Image (cartoon, coloured by chain):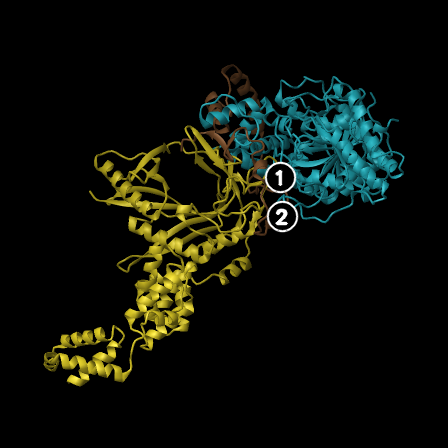
Amino acid sequence: MALSVKDVEHVSKLSRLSFGEDEKKDFVDKLNSVVDYIEKLEEVDVEGVKPTYHVLDVKNVFRDDEVKPSFKRKDILSNAPDAEGGCFRVPKVVK
Amino acid sequence: MEFKTIVGLEIHSELKTKSKIFCSCTTEFGGDVNTQCCPVCMGLPGSLPVVNKKVLDYAIKAGLAFDCDIASYSKMDRKNYFYPDLVKAYQISQYDLPLCSNGKITIEKEDGSTKDIGLIRIHIEEDTGKSLHGLKDVSLLDYNRSGVGLIEIVTHPDIETPEEAGLFLDELKSTLEYLEVSDVKMEQGSLRCDVNINVVSKDGSVKSRISEIKNLNSFKAVQKAIDYEAHRHTELLKAGKNSEKDTRRWDSEKNRTVFMRSKQHVEDYRYFPEPDIVDFEISDEWIQEIRDNLPELPKAKKERFVKEFDIPAYDAHVLVSDKKLAHYFEALCADFNDPKLISNWIMTEMLRRMNLEEVTLDDLKFEEKDLVVLFEQMAQNKISNNAGKKVFRKMFETGQKPLELIELMGLKQISDDDFIEGLVTEVLDENPEAIEDIKNGKDRAVGYLVGQVMKKSKGKANPQMVSQMIKDHCL
Amino acid sequence: MEIYDLTIHEVRDLLEKKEITSVALVEKVFERIDAVEEDMASFLALYKEEALEKAEVMDAKYEAGEPLGDLAGIPIAIKDNMCTIGKKTTCGSKMLENFVPPYDATVIEKLEDAGAIIIGKTNMDEFAMGSSTENSAFQVSKNPWNLDYVPGGSSGGSASAVTAGEAFGALGSDTGGSIRQPASLCGIVGIKPTYGLVSRYGLIAYASSLDQIGPLSKDVEDAAIMLNAIAGHDGRDSTSAPKEKVDYKKALVNDVKGMKIGVPKEYFGEGVNPKVKSLIYKALEQLVALGAEYEEISLPYTEYALPTYYIIAPAECSSNLARFDGIRYGYRAEKFEGVDDLFTKSRTEGFGEEVKRRIMMGTHSLASGYYDAYYNRAMKVRTLIREDFDKAFEKYDCIITPTAPDKAFKIGEKTDDPLAMYMSDICTVPVNIAGVPAISVPAGFIDDMPIGMQIIGQHFDEETIIKVAYTFEQNTDFNKRAIL
C-alpha cells in the first residue's frame, strides 16, 4: 500500500526528519517503490508460525549486582556539542 | 446527580540495587552530575545492555508480596520516543509480557473495613536522566539517573477517594520498604506516582474523559490532586460539558492541576522486542527461592503483634509502619516483659521526639539495652514514672546511661518504709481535717495528702507506697 | 612479489624468522598507501605514527623471543563503524564526522591483545547501509581491479584496502552481505561468522539481530587467523554465544572427500548473471573432482528473504539511529527553535538519503497499525527461512551459492534506483536472516572482474565452510591479487 504524502509526513514526524517540498516527491516515490516490494511478504502463509526475535537459542543472560567504576565526566562530556556546569545543555524542554 | 470518582495509579519505584539495570554504574543518589555514567547508560553508539539479575529478583519479590502471578516467560521491549533525558531515544521496558500481573493491595480504612485495590501489572524498565532547569531558555541534562532500574506498578481503576489513595500508597510504600527493594522516598524521586482519573454518574449515564496527572511530589499532593480533579470533572459534567482527555501537571503552590498537553493523539511508541537482550525463563525454583526468603510483611507482622503482644491494633499499625521500628520494638520486648509499656513508651516518648528532632532509629544516642535498664528501674519502683520520663529525655539528648543520670539528677525514688512513714506521720499531723475527709470517703483528700508528702520528699517518695500508707493510717 | 602482496601468514613467517621487522612492514604498507590511496580512497583515517610506535613495541617482543600470536606486528585496517578509543569513528556519516569514542570495541581490544597493528579506519557506506560505498558521506572507494567500478559495500573500504595491498587484513561488518559481497567483487576472502560468535560490543549498530563483525583477507588461512583473534564470548554483549573457543586454523585441511553440498536452485534464478551461474557450477565440478558431491536442493522461502531483510533491518535501524539527536554527541544543527526542531534539523542535515530512507521505512514498519503486517510478519517469515536452512543441513554439510549476482558494477550505475542496489544482496541476505555463517572465496572472473563463491554452513560450523573454502583455494588459483 503506497504511502500518501500525509503518511510520509506522519512518519517523518515520528522519525524527527524533514523533507523539503522539492525533494519530497522524489523521496516519496523511491520510498514507495520499496514499500511495494516489501509487501511481497503478504503472499506468505504464516499461519501458526512463531516469530524469531532472537536467532540465538540462549535465555537468561545476566550479570551480578556489582558496582564498577563509572567513566570520568570529561569522557562522558567529551563529544558534547554544548555543555555547561558538567551537564549537557539544550534548549528548554516544554514539559 | 451523584457522581463516583474512578482513580487508577501508575507508580514508578526506583530499585535499590547497587548497580544500574543494564550496566555496573552505581545507583547512589546525589552524586555530582554526570559522574555515574558509562557508555551503556549514556547509550553511546556501539554500547549494549546486560541485565542485572537482582532487578528481576526485586521485581519478583514485589510481585509475590502483592499477590501477583509471576510470568514463567518474559522479555524486554523497546519503547521508542524522542526526549532529551532518554539517551537512546528508546526506553528498554516491558510491553506485552510483564514480569508480574494480576495482584492486589488490601487497604484497611479507619472504620475497620478493608478493600482490595487490584494491580494490573508490575514490570521492569530503565530510568531516564534528569533535566535540571537552567537559566532562561535552557535545560541542563544530568544522566546519573539514566539506567537505574525501576519497577512500574499499574493499578486497576479501583480507587475511589483521596483517602483510599493515601492508604494504598502507605501500604505500598511500607511493603516495598520491608522488602528492601526500594527506598521509596518521594521527595528524592525514588517513588513517583501518576494519577489517572475520571468521574461517572452513579446511574452510569454520563462520564468524563480521563485526565492524567503528573508532577506529584508527595502522598498528600496525590490526595489533593484527586480531590481537585474529581471536583473539576464533576462540575464540568454538571454544567453539561466534559473534560478533555489530557495530561495535566499538579501545581503544589496553587493547589490545582494545569493543562500540559492533549492526549487525543496517542503517542506511537512503536514497541518491538529488544533485540540486544535475550528472553527470560523464570523457573518455579527461582520463584520459590524468593518466596521462601520473603520477610514478614507489615500486615502479617501487625496481626502477630496484636496477638502475641496484646497491644491495640492502632499501636501495632504505628509500630509496623517502619520495619526498623518494628524490629526495635520486638528486640525490646525480648529483653523486657511489658510490651504494652514498651509500645506506649515508643509511641509517646520516642516517636514524638524523633519526629521533632528529625532523628531516625539509627541516629539514636542511647542503646537499646539502656532503655531496658530504665524500664527495669521504673518497674522495680526505684524511680517514679515521671522521673523516668525526665531521665529518658536526657538519654535522648546526650546518650548518657540511665543509672548515671538517676544519680546525677537525684531522682532515686525513696521506697524506704521508715523514711516514708516519717513523712506521712508529719503530713497527717499537719492535716487533721484531711484524715476526717478520708474517713468519710473523700478520696481526693488522699491525693492531696500524697501531694504533700511528695513535696516534702522533693518528689522522691514512692507515691504508691505513700498513698497506701496514708490509707492504712486513716482507715 | 612485493611485501604488500603477501598474506598475513607469509609475513608472520618472515617476522618469526627475523627477515623483516614490524616497523619495516608498517613502513612498507604506508609506502603502498602513499602510492595508491589517492586512487583507492579506502581509508577515512590513517594512524602512521601510532602504528610505528606499536610496531616498535612488537619488534622488541620479537627480539626478546617472547611467544607471540599469529597477528603480532601485522598491519590491519578497521571498518569505521567499530569504536576505537580516542580516535574518530564516523560510520561514513556526517552525523559522526567528529565523534571520538571514549572506549574500544571488544574486537579492537582483542586485536590489540593479539599484537596486531591497527593502521587506520576504512571507508564504508553510511551506517553500513549500502552495497558500494557510494553512500559514504565522504568518498567513494574504488575497486582495485578497475577504478571505474565499485568495490562493493558496505565494507568497501576494507575490501579495497586489502585487495590493493594497503593492509594485510581488515575487519568489516556484515548485516545483509556487507563483508561477503565486497570480498566477491574484489576477489578476496570474507567471512560472516555465525550470529553471536563475535562480540558486537563497540560495533555501532545498524540492525541488532543481523549485524556481525568478520574478517576480509587475501586467503582463507588469513581469514581463519583473524577469526581466531576476534571470536569468543563477551560478557558485555548479551547476544554473544556462550561457546567454547575453537581454533579455526585446525579447519585448514585440504580435503573435501565425502562432503555433501546442497545447491539451492533459488540462488541461480532471475537476477543472477548466467555467467555467474556457470562459474559456480564449474567450481562445484572442481569440488566433485576433489571428492565432494552436490545436489540441487530447494530453499523455497529464499525469494522472501530480501523483502524480509528490508523490513527487519530498517525497523531495527530506525530505532538504533534514533539516539543521534544532537544532544550528547554527533552533528548538531546550527539554527533551531526548541528541542524538537533541534532533533529534526540535526538528523535531517546529518544523515544521508539512503539512511533517511531506511529510517522512514523502519519507522513505518513498526508504526501502530502496521506492526503486524510488516515487522511481526517479517519475523515469522524469518522462522520459515531459518527452517529452510535447518532442514537442508540435516542432509548436507554445507550449501554453495554465488556470493553476488554479478561482477562489480560501475560507480554511479545504481545510485538512482534503490531497489536495483538492494538486489546486490539477494544471495547474501538469507544468511543473516538465519544467523548462519558464510564465507566468500574467489571463484573466477567475468570480464576480468572477480566473482566469489559463497559457502554457507550450519550455526557455529565455521570449520566446515573454512575447510571447503580452503580446499577449493588450494586447488585453484583465483586468489591472485589485484596488481596495479
Q: Position of residue C350 (x, y in %)?
A: 57, 24
Task: Say left or right for B426 vs C274.
Answer: left
Kindly identify which numbered label has been placed on residue C384.
1
At label 2, the amino acid type is Val
Foreground pick, B430 / B144: B430
Foreground pick, C402 / C325: C325
At label 1, the amino acid type is Leu
Q: Secondary structure at mark 2?
A: loop
Task: Say left or right for B2 vs C246.
Answer: left
Task: Say left or right for B18 vs C254.
Answer: left
Q: Position of residue C478 (x, y in %)?
A: 84, 28
Of discs 2 and 1, which sits in the foreground? 2
Q: Secondary structure at mark 1?
A: helix
Kindly identify which numbered label has been placed on residue A58.
2
Determine the residue positioned at 39% across, 70% down. Answer: B404
Q: Residue furthest top?
A: A22
Residue C188 can be seen, yes or no: yes
Asked which quadrant contains residue B3, the reply is top left
